[in-house]
Amino acid sequence: MCGIVGYIGGREAYPILIKGLKRLEYRGYDSAGLALIDHSESLNVYKAKGKVSDLENAVEKNDTTGNIGIAHTRWATHGEPCQANAHPHYSASETLALIHNGIIENYASLKENLQERGYEFKSNTDTEVLVQLIEYFKNTETKDLLTAVQLALREVIGAYAIAVLDKNQPNLIIAARKSSPLVVGIGEDDFFLASDATPIVEYTDKVVYLNDEEIAVLKKGEKLKVVNLYNEEITAKEQIVKLNIGQLEKGGFPHFMLKEIYDQPECIRDCMRGRINMEGTNVILSAIIDHKERLLNARRFIIVACGTSWHAALIGKHLIESFCRIPVSVEYASEFRYSDPVVSSEDVVFAISQSGETADTLAAIELAKSKGAFIYGICNAVGSSIPRATHTGSYIHVGPEIGVASTKAFTGQVTVLAILALSLAKEKQLISQNDLEIILKELLIIPDKMAALLQKNAEIANLSAIFTYATNFIYLGRGYCYPVALEGALKLKEISYIHAEGYPAAEMKHGPIALIDAEMPVVVIATQNGMYEKMLSNIQEIKARKGKVIAFVTEGDNVISQIADYCIELPETIECLDPLITSIPLQLLAYHIAACKGKNVDQPRNLAKSVTVE
Ligand code: M6R
């Protein structure tokens, strides 16, 4: 989704803005732009359709000097991706420039009112309405930019993170947020602004995350001031971000996605650190200790999430129901928020999100909170909106995920869900010490097994090259691996644009089997677990219809290798941890097919990393 960067201070703003936009490229976008107030105090706006590099080419021969500027990558919502719709937008008099992430829901009525007052619009965006509205208040009610922004935002219904420049106040950036993320970085004698901390960490580790309806006043030579829409001052809570630049670079890999797939052994170690003791005899999740009564006495759990996080939630349901005997329902956050759900104060709602910014998940949390539920977040991005909106939670600690297709966040989420289920089962005395230790010891060696299976990368790459012809894929799994099949299919769709469907294997015969012919690749997860024999029959059914079976099996399996067209052997693990092993080769399969087809693996078309609008 849209990315915001801003700078005000003593340095040249342009290189900071461009670098910042590049750091935010992973969010997904289709055009880019920036505004600078130069040393002679003119306000220059430059925009281009396409990538940040297209913007750089477009501004090459122009004046890019100035110590104050704002920049933006746009992910189209209102109006097609084109130069006119790209941000920043000028106000009518071209004295103001504004960038925006979010959606102004009542833009049509605001626009109509402004048009009646003679305002004309150059774009189809909701954003241009906001900058004109601010200018309207500046012309009619106040000369002060902050007051005009406050008056305008009081009229707005919707979501926004904005930054505004006024060429008549060249030492000032006004930034505000509601439902879309915005972070202020505090330097020695300068300020940085961004949608998340990634463009900021290079310059300072001191940040303030703005809350809803807060406005940051960034003025050269002054301290950060935060006020609300009614100009009441708010004490800004400074935090230290623990991110290093190395975590944001590709580290020799051709794509972030491949790097992040390879990061998984280390990430899963980080995720377990301090939660499972080295001997594998004990498990502790601090949120469970702190809120034991609330969690143990819950009537039921509801998990809300979207996309990959929703797939992890399905595995979480299986783990929690098996080990803790607590009923769990898994809901798409986008459906839950509009479904008038039956939720009470006896329920615990878990919200799973990599970015911690997904608009639908945030709205689902607010709804559940309003009904009295206790909210537990499972997130990756530290300090993001969801951890701040929940009562408690656990970070997955897998580090920044830059590739749009989620990989290490998925295995991190599954790991935290396994730890959560085991901790609760221990507290409820539903698991024997012996059984607990078997699983914990296995969890501790999962990173080594992940590292071993990554050795199969070349084998999977060769296999992938065979299937670039395909226009459809079917993925099958059962039990714990049914959500893995869904996730494998989503990965392929997202980055290779090949249509793929995940199914519980036994559902095949209720319809999808009609699709099987000699052209159809069918990916089957058939590891040695309680469902093995059933999977074997499902494979026979596909082979009987000449489907091309690509099977992922447990090391040493010499039965399926006789039947399947292609077979990849994976390290053995216990059934409930199977997703941590089986999801990785499916990530690699999708990656290599997309890379072979020459697709933009890290920034697939139409997709955004942080889905901050509904
Ligand atoms: O940041 P979140 O986990 O809340 O994001 C949810 C989905 O948008 C996300 O998982 C999406 O499906 C990914 N692109 C999957 O690879």
Image: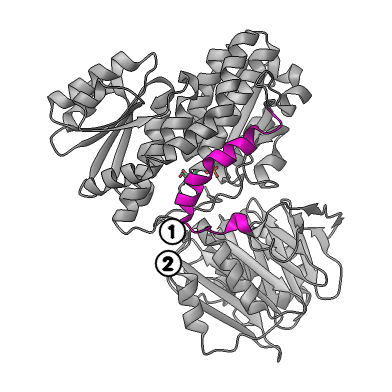
**Residue type at the position of mark 2:** Pro
Whole-percent x, y for residue 12 in the image: 69, 81
Q: Position of residue 480 (x, y in %)?
A: 44, 23
Callout 1 amino acid: Pro
Identified at 54% across, 60% down, the residue is 2
Q: Is mark 1 within 8 Å of ligand 1?
A: no
**Residue 571: percent from the left, percent from the top?**
42, 28
Asked if the stretch drawn in magenta spans residue 31, the answer is no
What's the magenta bit mostly, secondary-structure-wise? helix
Name the residue beneath numbered marker 2: 81
Along the line of sight, the residue nearer the viewer: 349 or 336: 349
Quadrant position of residue 217: bottom right
Mark nearer the viewer, 1 or 2: 1
Q: Which residues are magenta?
A: 246-275
Q: Is residue 165 visible to the viewer in this orientation of the structure? A: yes
* Residue shown at the point (45%, 31%) measured from the top left: 581
Name the residue at 48% across, 82% down: 58
* Residue receiving disc 1: 254
- The answer to whether residue 544 is above or below residue 18 is above
Q: In the figure, residue 149 lies in which quadrant?
A: bottom right
Nearer to us in this view, 571 or 504: 571
Dot 2 crowding, Cα within 10 Å, few <14, some 14–19, many 20+? some
- The residue depicted at 86 percent of the width and 54 percent of the height is 235
Would you call the spot at circle 1 few (<14 residues within 10 Å), some (14-19), or many (20 or more)? few
In the current view of this chain or complex, which residue is farthest to the bottom? 40
Q: Position of residue 416 (x, y in %)?
A: 60, 30
